[in-house]
Image (tube, grey):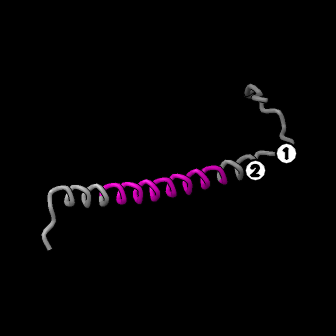
Amino acid sequence: MHFGPTTKITIGWIVCVTGGLGLFYLAKRNIDKQRYENMKSRQRMRAANEGNYEQSYRNFPVSR
């Protein structure tokens, strides 16, 4: 089958746009997964840091 130049350009654009959207979706999903893991890690650190502690002799500033 013979394609004209306009048809070839259209097919190229369709391939590029479809591939770009697919890669964008995969990258976004990967970033969301990493963000979720970071959030869970911070939540575990926050939960582990709760409670009453003795005053340190080094007198760290209180960040509350």
Circle 1 sits on which residue? 51
Quarter-wise, where is residue 9 in the image? bottom left
Spatial CA distance of label 2 from label 1 is 8 Å
Could you tell me the amino acid type at mark 1? Gly
Helix, strand or loop at mark 1:
loop
Quarter-wise, where is residue 13 in the image? bottom left
Q: Residue at x 21, y 60 (%)?
A: 7
Of residues 54 and 36, the one drawn nearer to the viewer in this rendering: 36
Q: Residue at x 30, y 60 (%)?
A: 15
Asked if the magenta segment contains residue 25, the reply would be yes
Could you tell me the amino acid type at mark 2? Ala
User: What's the mark number on residue 48?
Assistant: 2
Above or below, 27 against 51 in this view is below
Left/right of residue 31 with respect to residue 21 in the rendered view:
right
The magenta region covers 16-40
Above or below, 63 against 37 in this view is above
